[in-house]
Image (tube, rainbow, N blue to C red):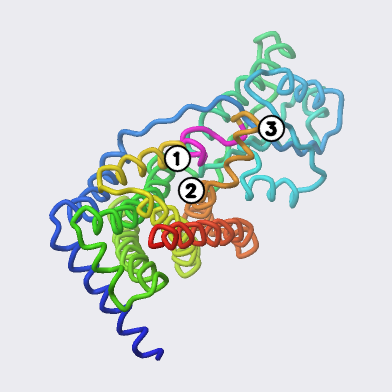
Amino acid sequence: MIKSFLLRVLALMKKEFITIWNDPKSRGIIIMMPIMQLLIFSNAVTMEVKNIDTVVLDHSQSVESRELLSRFENSNRFRNFYYVENEKEFQKKLDTQEVQIGINIPNDFSRGIKSKKGTNVLVISDGRQTNSAAIGAGYATQIIAGYNSELTGNTGTQINPTVRNWFNPNLEYKWYILTVIVALLSLVSTLILTALSIARERELGTFDQLIVSPLSSFEILLGKSIPPLIIAMSLTMIMVGIVIAFFHVPFNGSIILFFVSILISLMAIVGVGLFISAICNTQQQAILSVMTFMMPAVLLSGFISPIEDMPVFLQYITYLNPVRFFMVLSRGIFLKGMGLEDIAINIIPLIIIAIITLSLAARTFKRKLG
C-alpha cells in the first residue's frame, strides 16, 4: 500500500517537473528571473529610515550623561529607549534586533568633561540594517557634537563619539540587500510555481483527468507541493553560492540551520500558493493573485521600513506574514551567525503559519473537488 502510494506521488511529481521544464515561460520565471533580479536589485534598491530604537548603557550616571541622553530623548529622530544595567543586556538588545543603535557612556564621562581632558561615547549600530545603521549613527554623532558645542562654545572637543558597526563593520550595503533578496526570490519562485500548478491544469483542460485518476486529494497536493520546494531550494543554493563567491558576502551561521529555515518558510508559502491555485481558474488570475499577496507581504516584512515604525495594528498583522520571519532569519544567520534560541523564536511562528496555510489549501482544494 505504501509502495503504490509512493509510486503514484512520484509519477505526479515527474509529470509536474516535465510540465514546468517544457513550458518556456516557467523556465524563464524560475531560472532567469531570480538571477537577473538578484543582480539588478543589489544595485537599484534603496531605503529610508524614519524612527530609531535605542539601547543605553550609562556607566557614568552623572548629571552630564543625563544631559546628553535628554538630547536624544527630545530628538524626533529617536523613539524608544531601553536603559540596561550591563554589557550582556546591551548586546542582547542589538543581537535580537530590538534596537538599531546602542549608546555606551563610560565611567569617566563626567570626570573627563570637568577636567577638560575629554572623553569618548561609544555609538554602536546594527550593521545588518545598513541604511538604518548609517543614518542612525549620523544622527547620534550630530546630537553628541551639539552637546559638545554647548559645553565648549565651539572652542574645542571634549566629547568624542566613537562609532562601531556590528555584524557589518564597513556598512557594506550589498551585504544587507543581497541576503534579503535571496530570501525574497526563493519565496516568490515557490509562490508562483505553486499558484500556477492547479490553475494550469484547469486552463489546459487536464484537471478533470487528475480528478478521475487513482490519486487522492492529499496525493495530488503532495505531488504539486514537492517539485516547487525542490526547485526553490536548488535555486536558493545557487543564489547563496553567487552571493558568497561573486559578492564576497561572508556566511557566518550554520548552513544546515539556514536551509532548514528556508524549507519551513517555503512550506508556509506553498500553502498560500496552493490556496491561490485552488480558487483561480486561469494562470492569469493566479499571477494577479500572487502579486496581490506579495506586495503587502513585502511591505509588511520590514524590508522597506522597520516594522517598529509602522502603526500598531499593522505591527500585529505582520505576525501573520511568513516573509517577516524569514527576513530576520536570512539576515541573522547569514551575517551574525544567529544562535539556535533566536532561530527557534522565528521558526516557531513559521511552523504555525505553514500548518494553517497548508490546512486551508487542502480544505479549499477538497471543497473544489466536491
Disc with the residue nearer the chain's start (2 vs 1): 1
Q: Tell me what residue is drawn at x 54 percent, y 51 percent.
A: 325
Residue 121: mark: 3
Instruction: Determine which residue is flagged by label 2.
Output: 323
What stretch of residues is rendered in magenta? 297-308
Q: Secondary structure at mark 1?
A: helix
Q: Percent position (x, y) of residue 248?
A: 34, 53
Instruction: Determine which residue is flagged by label 1.
Output: 298
Q: Are marks 2 and 3 in contact (CB under 8 Å)?
A: no
Q: Tell me what residue is drawn at x 65 percent, y 27 percent.
A: 160
Residue at the far top in the pictured view: 153
Q: Are marks 3 and 1 in contact (CB under 8 Å)?
A: no
Residue 50 versus residue 123 in the image, above or below: above
Task: Name the image quarter holding residue 229.
Answer: bottom left
The Cα atoms of the two marked residues, 2 and 1, are separated by: 7 Å
In the foreground, 96 or 127: 96
Residue 269: mark: none
Q: Tell me what residue is drawn at x 30 percent, y 43 percent.
A: 285
Q: Amino acid at mark 2?
A: Val
User: Which-is-in-front pick, marks 3 and 1?
Assistant: 1
| Residue 305 lies in the magenta stretch | yes
Q: Percent position (x, y) of residue 152?
A: 71, 13
